[in-house]
Every structure is written in structure tokens, then in C-alpha cells.
Image: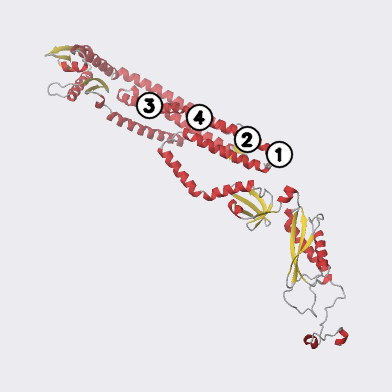
Amino acid sequence: MKKKWRAFITFVLVACLIFITNLLAYSQENAIPESKFDGAPVVFNHETLFVIREKLGLGSPQQRAREISGRIERFAQDFSLPLDSLQIAEAEGIAVVYSGETALVGITAADAKAAGTTQQQLAAEYIQKIRTSIGQYRKEHSLKHLIFAIIYTVISTVIFIITLAIFNNIFPRIITQIYAWENTRIRGFRIQNFELLSSHQIARFLSRLSKITRWLVTFVIFLIYIALVLSFFTWTKILGQDIFSEFKKAIAFVWDKFIGYLPNLFILALIIVITYYIIRLLKPIFNALERGHISLPGFYSEWAEPTYNLLVFLLLALAAVVAFPYLPGSDAPAFKGISILLGILLSLGSTAAVANIVSGFILIYTRAFRIGDLVNVAETEGFIEEKLLLVTRIRTHNNNLVTIPNSLLIANKVINYSAALRDHNTPLLLHTSVTLGYDAPWRKVYQAFIDAALSTSYILEDPAPFVLQTSLNDFYVTYELKAYTNQPAMMPKIYSELHENIQDKCNEAGIEIMSPHYSAIRDGNQTTIPENYLPKDYTSPGFRLSPLSHLFNSTNQPKNSEEHE
């Protein structure tokens, strides 16, 4: 608590020192504003009594004014000289205001002519002002005035201390009440499911705002207190009046600016209200479109949310453009310069971001994929985890999260394994290729492959799987097995099990899965079919020999093997 009071006292003293220093400089510079008058002013007790415009003998108006001011001050300081001793007399064509043997002011015909009156009338006016000013001066410098000034100071100090005590009691209670309203009357600010400001953050902001308000109000009351106390004493009266004057000017300036800004404030409030209610009107419409309660030709339900967000962004951008000229300081050159600089920086630095945003909207309206779809794009296969304006996140089969910029998605082809089943109830067609030698009967191969497909989990019997011969190569045939499934998410498991079943079924049918690329001597070698698929009495075949004449005389080949023997 002591630290807070020390900080407050230090802040107040520094602020007052700066403020008072400026006021003193202002008062010294403007004590006798000669340029304001057509002549030289006679100043007494910080007050201009009258102006001397003409010379008297060799004395200039400025010299006369200084001498008259000095004589009046000396008369006022001599409390033994009563005010009634001031008289008017005429000598040698000059009207003189005097007391005893001391002449205070001499008024010539030229002075009267410059003032547009007679010497007697001008002298009567001067003597009245002098008496009033001296009377006020002597009253302010009396012991009675000093005693009352001290009494008023004590009363003001007591009131000031009581006010500080009240503030010290009220504002902590306000802050405590603000935190008590957290999550009840003070709720977080959300945009859909995104919490922009939590309830605790808003409560903390309000509490800090209350503290700042407390300091500002206390400082203003302190300034008023200081100015009031200074105005009670003769020696500091001018300084107190200057503080009051500057404070009033500041308040008047702020008030005038506020009143002048009211029309703009009204227009800003109108723009905010209209924008707010348009957004509120659009929200239920697009919710109904998303749920299917409202249908528009050619408009898909998944477009509802992004279209709504796009319209909200455009409405906010339009509202900001319309409201910009009515913002305070929008016409200031510095504000315009900063706006231009920010615009240039955004234009130069946001090219990639804008490209990704545009690509994000294109992906949405082309319906390339949805959240949860199994896709293959940019050499990445996996499930769509998140779609954002700048990037799309894909979770691979290895549970890795891959972030791909939307502009890269637009530049590459997107294979969606889930779209046909979701939109048209058409099952996904899986395919795998196997190459076998020409010695394997193709009908037997077809049956083995189809049996393998039907033995695989998640493969549909209807439509039935089928086999294609995609190419007849030099040493082998390429077979392609195609089978349907309605579980695209299980595609890696389906392929693995399908390949297992192909091996089993081929082995059961006596088909070797080989793709020979050169001639091989197979006589006397074990077959590649696993042993558990071979007969128990299986033995490796022996070598078959042919006579050399068979190699060199193809025209005289024997008709059967007996002739070879």
C-alpha cells in the first residue's frame, strides 16, 4: 500500500511541477502584453488599470506607464495613506491625480483626446480604478485575509482527504465486484466456436480500466485542490487562477471536440448497428441452408458456412470502408501516411497469403473434398483433418499431420476416394496388378484372383470383382484385379489382406507368382510354391535330356520319345 501511495505522490508531484513550470513561463511571458494595446498599459497587482497612448514632455508612453505603475504601487504599500487622500487637481493645463504632495498620474489634453473624452472625465475614471485596485490589494494583504486563507486551506484539505478516502474505499469494491461477475454477468466474447476474449480477460481489462479511472479522477481533483489553495493566498493567487484557467480551457476544448464529433459518432453507431443486424439476419438463413431446411438450386449445404463467413467478412470490410472517414483523426496527414504505408506493406507481403486464401475458396466451391475424406494429393495420402483459408491439414495413414498450402492443392490433382460413395452411393473400385508367366492358365488365374478378392474383408460381392489382362509382355502377362468396397477408410488394410489372399489362392491353385525376364533352366529345381501347398509325395523333377540331333536337325525330329531311346 505504501508503494502505491509513494508512486501516486511521485506521479502527482512530477505532473504538477511540469504543469506549474509551464504556467510560470506563460505568466512571465504574458505579464504585460504590450502588443494587445495601442499604447503602454499601466499594470498594478497583475491587473491593467488603463493605457497611456501619448508622450509627456520627453517621456515616451512606455516610460510614463512604468513611472505611474511604480507610484501607484508605493502608495498602495503605504497603509498609512487612506484612499480618500486621492484627489484630482489641475495645474498648467494638466489634470493630476495626487495624494498629499505626490502626483500619481498626469493627464494631458492629448491623453483625453486619444481616449475620446475630457481631461476631468478621464481623471475621474482613472482615480476610480486606482482606488478600487489599491483597496483590493490592501484587503488581500491584510492579516484577516491571511487567516481566512489558512482556514479555507484547512477546510479544502480535509475535503480532499475525505474524497481520497472515499475513492480508496469505493474503487477496490468496484474491482472486487467486477471479478465476482466473472462468468456470470461478464461473459467471454466468442466468434462461433473461437473464444476471442475470455471472461477473465474482460474482467481484468475492466479492473484495469477502473484503476486508470481512479488515478485520473484523483489527479483531476488534486489539480483542483492545488489551484483552489493557491488562489486563497495573495502571493500565489495568479498561479491558482492560471491553473483554473488552463484546466477550464482543457475541459472546454475536450467538450467542444466531443460535441463537434457527435454527428460522426452517431453515423458510426448507425453503421455498427446496421452491420450487426444484417449479420444476425444472415445467420439463421445460412443455418437453415446448412441443415437442408432451405434449398437453393445448385447450392450445396456444405457451402453454407464458408459463404456466410465470406459475406460477414465482406460486410465488415464494407462497414470499415464506410466508417473510415468518420473516425477521429482520419483526415490527419500522419494517419493517412501510416495507412498508405500499411497498405503498401500488406500488398507486398501478402501475395502468397492472398493466393492461398483465394485457393481456399476455390477448393470449397469446387467441392474437391470435405473434412474426413480420404484423398491423395501432392504425393500425400490421408484423411482431411482441417480446412482453413490458408492451408489444409491431412492426417496420413502413419498418423502424421501434413500441412499443405491451398495454392499447392490447386496446382496439383486431388484424388478423392470418398466422394463417389458419399455423393452418389457408388462404391470405391480398388485395383492391384500381378504379373505371371505364360505357363499359368489365364482362366485358372482369373478364378484364383476372384476367390482371393471375395475372401477379403470389406470387399463387396455385388458388384462382383473382376480381372483384366492389361498387357502381354515379352515374358509374362500383367493381370489387374478390380474389386469394390464401401469402406474407403480401410483401404490400406484391404490392400494388405487382398495381397495375402492372392498369394494363398495362387499357391492353392498351383500357380507360381513369377515374372521371368530371361530363360531359366528349371529341370531338377524345386518349385517356388510353398511346401505346405505341395503334395506330400512331391519330389523335384529330374533333368530331361535330348539328343544333339534334335538341336541341329529340326526337320528330322522323332515323333515320340521312344525313337530317342
Q: Which residue is mark 2?
A: 282
Task: Report the number of discs.
Answer: 4
Which label number is shown at residue 249?
Answer: 3
Q: Give me the C-alpha separation between circle 3 and circle 2.
A: 48 Å
- Nearer-N-terminus badge (1/4): 4
12 displayed left or right of 67: right
Type of the residue with mark 4: Ile
Q: Amino acid at mark 3?
A: Lys
Q: Earlier in the sequence, mark 3 or mark 1?
A: 3
Q: CA distance from mark 3 to mark 4?
A: 28 Å
Which of the two discs, 3 and 4, labels the residue nearer the N terminus? 3
Residue 181: % across, % down = 59, 32
Q: Earlier in the sequence, mark 1 or mark 2?
A: 2
According to the picture, the residue beneath numbered tag 1 turns out to be 292
The reply to whether dot 2 and dot 4 touch (C-beta < 8 Å) is: no
Q: 67 or 565, which is in the foreground? A: 565
Residue that badge 4 annotates: 267
> Residue 370 location in percent, x, y?
67, 48
29 vs 432, nearest the viewer: 432
Question: The disc labelled 1 sits on which kind of residue?
Answer: Gly
Determine whether the residue tagged by mark 3 lies in a helix, strand or loop: helix
